[in-house]
Amino acid sequence: MKTAKTLSMALFLCLFVGCATSRQPGFEERDRFVINTPSYFDNKVFYVLQNLENDQYPLKRADQLTSDSKSMIFHGSPLSLILNNVTLPPSQAKGTKDIAVVLEVGTASSGESAPVVAWYQRGVRADQPLNFANLLIHFEPRWDSRVAPFVRIRVVDVSSEKNEEARDALAQVGTLAQGVSALIPGANQAAVSLGMKAASLVIASRANTQLLDYTVQFYSDEAIQAADGSGLTPLRKGRVLLVGRPLDHPSSYWASFKGSLDPATTQIYSNGSPVAAPVVTLTVSIAQSIVPAIVAQRSSYLTTLLRTAQQADLTAVKAAGKSVYDGARTFAAIENLRRNRDPSSLEELIQLEQNAGTEKVSDDDKALIRSTLKELTQCDVGSSAAVLAWKKANPNGFVFEDQKFKLKGVVCPT
């Protein structure tokens, strides 16, 4: 009877308090799930329209964009996110600030993401961009169009941070993350781990001032059409801006906002006047920016398996080992083609995609090969059959252009 009461009490606690094995956010994680309103509390997402005839590029909201097949990103394409710059507004307060940029990006079908300090800079003056440009922050080798990429951007003033552990971690991030792709798996595991530690400490501190905290998801054209538009933010190639509303303007400010970007100074204007608010600029690209990340990620998984070999069966280790080998082989073939730009390297890559060898290539690696061939040929080669049809339509060999990664005189099969 006593045992039954004990079990009943344990079940009660599990149901109403939470079992120890369930995933509950700790206090240090609370700001991942609860938003504290930042200093600049009203922000909008704008898309930059290229207009080479003018000195300034116009900005458009999602609902103002027209359909443009050139800027669309299709299912299975590689996806790169680049943090171009972060600009702070003028301030009446004297002195400088210590600024941390905390990013959280999710593009995988698993939905996993984690906040990372991507940049830390001391002594930042008002009305200046942070001292970096065009940092590659995330790479997804094969984007699933059902997944709406999730981006959370936080700009935090950590000038009043007194925690020595936090300041030490931030200082090390500043040393390690110079030019490091902070959110790319395998790019620099030391920097990533340190950036995650610094982020958890910065987020947990109530002494820090959140200047900007904004979350947005970007949707495929298919998802937008299924929702009949609805003002969803589309995933498009090109530059995307997060613009804050100046503190001395009411909410009606956006109704008359007519934004433009000066590419020379990265200053944002509205109706000819500078916008006195934080601005974050991102670029979305389909370039294969860091293909080796796939190899590194798989290698990291294999290393974990080998460290716990007593708990992992031999089949899992063999599968992970083959995955690393396949990733390295695919990367080497793509790099040979990009570097040599000759018919033999192209033929080698085609044979790899066609599974001509004794060892088969994974679907993810095939997708990378096809995206490379699509970039090279400007033809739709989204399947093995399409690659074979394209090859048959061009039986007389291949000639590479001198200045671009592109073939001359290619015939695309209809």
Image (spheres, grey):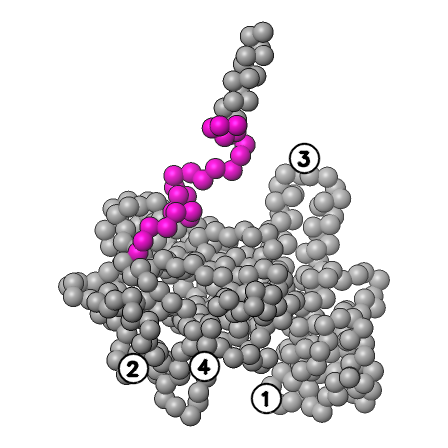
Q: Which mark is residue 403?
A: 1
For disc 4, the marked residue is 49
Sequence order check, earlier mark of 1 and 3: 3
Kindly report which numbered mark, 3 or 2, lies closer to the viewer in this rendering.
2
Which secondary structure, mark 3? loop
Q: Is residue 18 magenta?
A: yes
Specify few, some or many for label 3: CA neighbours under 10 Å numbering under 14, 14-19, or 20 or more. Answer: few
| Mark pair 1, 4: CA separation | 26 Å
Residue 45 visible? The answer is yes
Three-letter amino acid code at the position of disc 3: Gln
Instruction: Report the residue at 56% width, 52% height from top.
Output: 111
Please tell me which of labels 4 and 3 falls first in the chain: 4
C-alpha gap between disc 1 and disc 3 = 53 Å
Q: Give the percent coordinates (x, y) of residue 189.
A: 50, 53
- Return the residue at label 3: 310
Disc 1 crowd rating (10 Å Cα; few below 14, some 14-19, many 20+) is few
Residue 75: horizontal and vertical position, in percent?
A: 64, 67
Q: Which residue is mark 2?
A: 271
The amino acid at mark 2 is: Asn
The region drawn magenta spans 15-38
Distance between mark 2 and mark 4 Cα atoms: 16 Å
